[in-house]
Image (cartoon, helix red, strand yellow):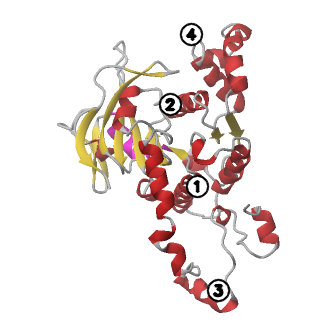
Amino acid sequence: MTEDLNDLVRKGQAPTGPLDGLLPVAVPPADTAAQASEGEGEPLPGLDDVRVSGFLADALARVKARCDGRELPLVTPWPGLNSMIGGGLWPGLVVLTGNTGSGKSQWALQVALAAAQASHPVLYVGLELDRLGLVCRLAALLTPERLQWADLYLGKVQTPDAFAKAKPVLETVPLYLDESRPGGWYMVDAEKRLKQMLEAYPGGMNRPCPLVVVDFLQIVGGPEKELRERIGRAAYDARILARRHNAVVVLISSTARENYLMMAGLARKKEGGVKEAKGVDALGAGDASRFVGLGKESGEIEYAADLVLALCRERQEEGGSVPPVWLAIAKQRAGVSGWCRLGFDGCRFSEGGSNGITTGRRNV
């Protein structure tokens, strides 16, 4: 069993940086430590450790398990979306971006609740939302009256009756809400929490893959002074976390202010910025991969991600009907980009209209 990071640090066998714990390595001898400090990197593992024959059997066993239906993806609440992403969310790094108020947190909570109800262990790290608000959001998703979570939160409904219907589910599902301090929570903390959670749900490959949601990426902590460097490091650490524990890791990312118009279908990306433009493809049409890279300081995020999703919504005209939400499948390593049309009532997303409109552009 892997030793606790703190024990490794005390023994001098691991770096002490707060993010380095995600990938602990032995401290190199003095002669190689000098080389590492000059930019030559960490000591390489032995050649036999990286030979394909050493992990071929495990890879073939995993492929067979997927072919036989013994290893399955995490199924989202929307069948049309599932059909476009290989049946659901497979282990790896998922980035979800969207404008303020587009429903990113509620989308992720709806996925998290459905996953927990399907026996996937779920860790939801809320760096912005308080625990009471998170519980109210979950409870509203479980009430047949289609309540708004804000009405629960503000005491505008008969709270005991509303919670009575949600309570039996929330008491039994493997769903954990970690209310953490913005800027003071590092990705290494996600691995510590995930390990605690998985100890309670053993089973290895036979266990439904775990889900980790970080809400949201731009307020994750780290030693880097520059925001771009900090969230870039966090994104790659999240991908390592997903690989190591065969987990789905969802990072919620805020949209850069200069891209708000594009996310509303009103502008196109241009070298040096964006501007309003006529003749732009409407939301739900054209190449969905144009929505890669619209998150704040996003750069490395999209490179690290296996799947990039963008919640796009037209501005609602005064007195007009509520516009649909278009989920752009902007990047998919194991598939093609495309669009999924969703409805959103402020609490829950539902599928409707034309789903699964695929552009045929493959992301690699």
For marks 3 and 2, the one nearer the N-term is: 3
Q: Position of residue 346 (x, y in %)?
A: 50, 21
Q: Mark 2 or mark 1: which is in front?
A: 1
Residue occupying the point 34% across, 44% down = 330
**Which residue type carries mark 4?**
Pro
Residue of label 3? 33
For this rendering, which residue is in front, 360 or 268? 360
For this rendering, which residue is in front, 256 or 59? 59
- Neighbor class of circle 3 (other Cα within 10 Å; few <14, some 14-19, many 20+) is some
Residue of label 4? 144
Judge whether residue 257 is colored magenta. yes
Residue of label 2? 107
Quarter of the figure with the C terminus: bottom left
Span shown in magenta: 253-264
Q: Is the residue 250 above or below the residue 364 in the image?
A: above
Q: Real-space Cα distance between discs 3 and 2? A: 46 Å
Q: Is the residue 31 above or below the residue 53 in the image?
A: below
For marks 4 and 3, the one nearer the N-term is: 3
Q: Real-space Cα distance between discs 4 and 3? A: 61 Å
**Which residue type carries mark 3?**
Ala
Q: Mark 3 or mark 1: which is in front?
A: 1
